[in-house]
Amino acid sequence: MIMEIEHISRKSPPPPPHSWRSLARRFSHFLLFRCDPFFLQFLYFLLISLSGFLVLRSPAVAGRGRHIEDLDLFFTSVSASTVSSMNTVEMESLSPAQLWVLVVLMLAGGEVFTSLLGLQFTSLKLRLKREDSTVGSGGELEDKREVLRWLGYAVLGYLLCFHLAGIFLVSVYFAVARDAREVLRRKAIGVPLFAVFLVVSSFSNCGFVPTNENMAVFKNDSALLLMVIPQMLAGNTLFPCGLRLAAWVAKRAARRKELAGVLRAPEAVASEYKHLLPRRHCVYLAATAVGFVAVQVAMVCAQEWRSSPEVLGGMEWYRKLVATLFEAVNSRHTGETIVDVSKLSPAILVLIAVMIAHGNVGFSVGYSCERRTKVNPNGSCKDASYGFVGRWSSKGKIILMMVMLLGRLKKFQINGGKAWMFG
């Protein structure tokens, strides 16, 4: 009996060649041609949020610090991956390893990085189309794929240059600025960790900072604030402008006719990559961004120039100007802050409310027991650096997580008042 089984097993045909390759090809076809793009991106953000949560709660990463509830860790992971700048825990309660995990989540959830992934998916889709197409149309698909490939190199170079330059400059600043370095030493935060975290958070427009006070502890470090501002702009509104510059540099360096053609006529790849805009549109976009920031700077300076020390009082004129510029840029982009926003005048609060609503930015003033209208005689209230969302119920936090995930995909509803663009 055993000999018969061995004989049959020897006679059984081997698995067909390239079976795994065929299976992978079918799966790729299903993802690229059958699945809805909205579903794919929703699944992407959900998976990296879940993965980040599992890593954050693992004992090897969490360490022996303060115990944080699982729901708060999941909320923090979702907020970092969707770059929503909302947190329910104090940042200094996280271990250094957990902060590094947040760095990865913010990088993976940033608009520039996700657009780079989209380029790779589109390039793969064109390759599969070319393999299935006729000889005549295959050449056109290959040309477009080559254009997207070099455009991907330009985006990757843009991403790396801004991150590496920002990390280098911030590290050098802390190496020469003793007071700023002393702040990190008191908080037991390493300079490399802070530099990487700040640059990635600013470029991805997440707004997280490893300190409980956000950037308020560096209010007088004008040089540091000026280093961070370009990161915020380059990763958000001015990305199309910077991308054109990066593509132009890549064209001059590599001397590729594909990039020259796409710079002359970006509408040729508009359906595959919407971030590359014509030159005139980039000029209008830059003028609009600068105009919004200039209006805010002028109004804040007019209203808050002689304000209390909690805002701009007691600072030199150039520090006031840099602080105002930093706050104006953050109200439309990132959500980092160096002042107590609640102490600003009502007129400026209205202006900031309009700007943060336009830019989907979340400012937080923390949770202060002194601002409560009804004081608890038991004295159970405790100040916290996180926003009011930290005091929400578990159901409320779950609803907010869904809102953050869907809000990250708002580009599928670019035509306001119309249905979501599925398919």
Image: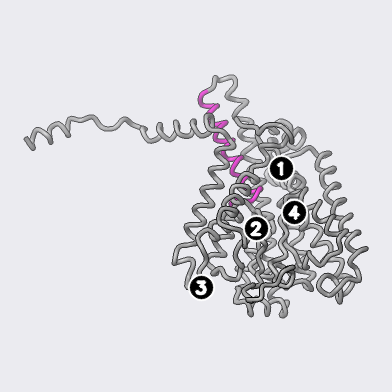
Q: Earlier in the sequence, mark 3 or mark 2?
A: 3
The residue identified by callout 2 is 86
The residue identified by callout 1 is 251
Q: Secondary structure at mark 4?
A: loop
Q: Secondary structure at mark 3?
A: loop
Number of numbered discs present? Answer: 4
Do the residues under discs 2 and 4 have CB atoms within 8 angstroms? no
Q: Earlier in the sequence, mark 1 or mark 2?
A: 2
Disc 2/disc 4 C-alpha distance (Å): 14 Å
From the viewer's perspective, is 4 left or right of 309? left
Instruction: Tell me which corner region of the image, top left, top right, bottom left or bottom right, holds residue 88.
Output: bottom right
Measured as percent of width and height from the top left, residue 289 is found at 82, 49
Q: Quadrant for the C terminus, please.
A: top right
Let me know if residue 14 is in the magenta part.
no
Predominant SS of the magenta segment: helix
Disc 3/disc 2 C-alpha distance (Å): 22 Å
The residue positioned 72% from the left and 62% from the top of the image is: 336
| Image: 188 above or below 198 | below
Disc 3/disc 1 C-alpha distance (Å): 50 Å
Can residue 200 be seen here? The reply is no
Q: Quadrant for the N terminus, please.
A: top left
Neighbour tally class for label 1: few under 14, some 14-19, many 20 plus, Cα within 10 Å: many
Do the residues under discs 1 and 2 have CB atoms within 8 angstroms? no
Measured as percent of width and height from the top left, residue 93 is found at 57, 70
Q: Amino acid at mark 2?
A: Met
Q: Earlier in the sequence, mark 2 or mark 4?
A: 2
Furthest residue toward right? 302
